[in-house]
């Protein structure tokens, strides 16, 4: 298991009013390689969980002040990304009530540490599967870039963030020059390989882990330039243009830029970049 999953990436919070049990479980999980903390009651756990580092909550059900069921319900509302395992020594505790509250799994005390590890592993496998399915649903399988559906979702998010934080935001729309003629001459398989190459060119000429690149449709691409004003956008656009000239295998690109201003709607923003792209293509004599 330790070789399949990096336990050190998981931050676990154990909550139990029985100090010996809670501290013992924490120490066993630390020995397995997890990052684990222990706290003795549900109210203090909610305060601790404000630190968004935690990926797992492992909580006892029968606790004073704030019991495990209420803690699970609250955490599920406030931090839906956290995986939750409930523990109890009450043989009559209704399993479905715990699951309905929002727990991912349930374990009866006393238990072996191997049983707890197996439950965590099952949750990790399910989480990895969900994450992969989510990734595939927003990814263009040919270029490896995000797809058009995700473009509009991310654009809306970034515009909202720009309005809140008053940071600049720019957009690039990129269209391959005469790609239809390329496809007609060399065939669609070669055209697909070219589109795959385009994805690599775009990824290597934007800011890694900052800018967000998309296949907008056909031979059109988009890049959301986070915290980038017109000057940065112009520099990245020039870099992309040069990247296609040097590595595009004879295929070049036209680029339209837009920098967001507060009076713009999402549609206005995209349309400005599109108009600027069409203007560039017109100057080149490309329809």
Image (cartoon, rainbow, N blue to C red):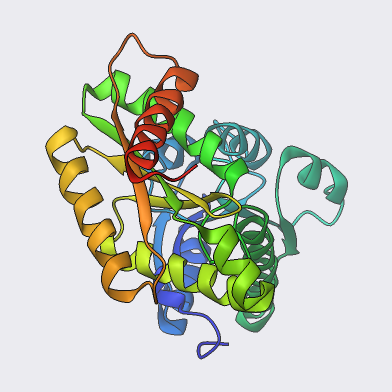
Quarter of image, res 173: top left
> What residue appears at the point 44 percent right and 67 percent down from the top-left corner?
198
Q: Can you see residue 120? A: no
Question: Can residue 153 be spotted in the picture?
Answer: yes
- The residue at the point 62 percent across, 53 percent down is 84
Q: Nearer the viewer, residue 275 or 285?
A: 285
Q: Residue furthest bottom?
A: 3
Of the 4 image quadrants, the one containing the N terminus is bottom right
The residue closer to the viewer here, 209 or 147, is 147
x%, y% of residue 214? 49, 51
Please name the residue shown 77% across and 45% down the image: 98
Q: Residue furthest left?
A: 231
Residue 105 coordinates in the image, percent (x, y): 73, 59
What x and y, as percent, mark residue 256?
34, 38
State left or right for residue 67 relative to residue 53: right
* Point 49% across, 62% down: residue: 22
In the image, 63: left or right of 238? Answer: right
């Amino acid at each position: 298991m330790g070789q399949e999953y990096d336990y050190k990436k998981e931050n676990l919070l154990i909550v139990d009013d029985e100090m010996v049990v809670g501290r013992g479980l924490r120490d066993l999980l630390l020995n397995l390689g997890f990052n684990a903390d222990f706290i003795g009651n549900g109210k203090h756990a909610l305060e601790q969980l404000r630190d968004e580092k935690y990926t797992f909550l492992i909580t006892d059900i029968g606790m004073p002040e704030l019991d495990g069921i209420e803690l699970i319900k609250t955490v599920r509302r406030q931090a839906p990304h956290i995986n939750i395992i409930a523990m109890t020594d009450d043989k009559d505790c209704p399993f479905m009530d715990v699951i309905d509250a929002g727990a991912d799994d349930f374990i009866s005390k006393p238990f072996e540490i191997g049983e707890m590890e197996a439950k965590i592993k099952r949750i990790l496998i399910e989480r990895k599967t969900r994450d992969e399915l989510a990734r595939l649903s927003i990814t263009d399988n040919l270029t490896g870039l995000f797809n058009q559906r995700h473009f509009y979702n991310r654009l809306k998010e970034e515009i909202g963030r720009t309005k809140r934080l008053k940071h600049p935001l720019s957009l690039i729309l990129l269209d391959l020059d005469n790609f239809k003629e390329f496809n007609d001459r060399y065939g669609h398989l070669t055209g697909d390989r070219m589109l795959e190459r385009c994805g690599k060119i775009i990824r290597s000429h934007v800011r890694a882990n900052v800018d967000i690149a998309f296949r907008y449709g056909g031979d059109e691409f988009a890049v959301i330039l986070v915290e980038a004003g017109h000057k940065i956008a112009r520099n990245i656009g020039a870099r992309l243009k040069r990247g296609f000239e040097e590595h595009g295998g004879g295929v070049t690109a036209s680029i339209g830029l837009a920098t967001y201003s507060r009076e713009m709607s999402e549609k206005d923003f995209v349309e400005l970049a599109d108009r600027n792209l069409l203007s560039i293509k017109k100057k080149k004599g490309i329809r």
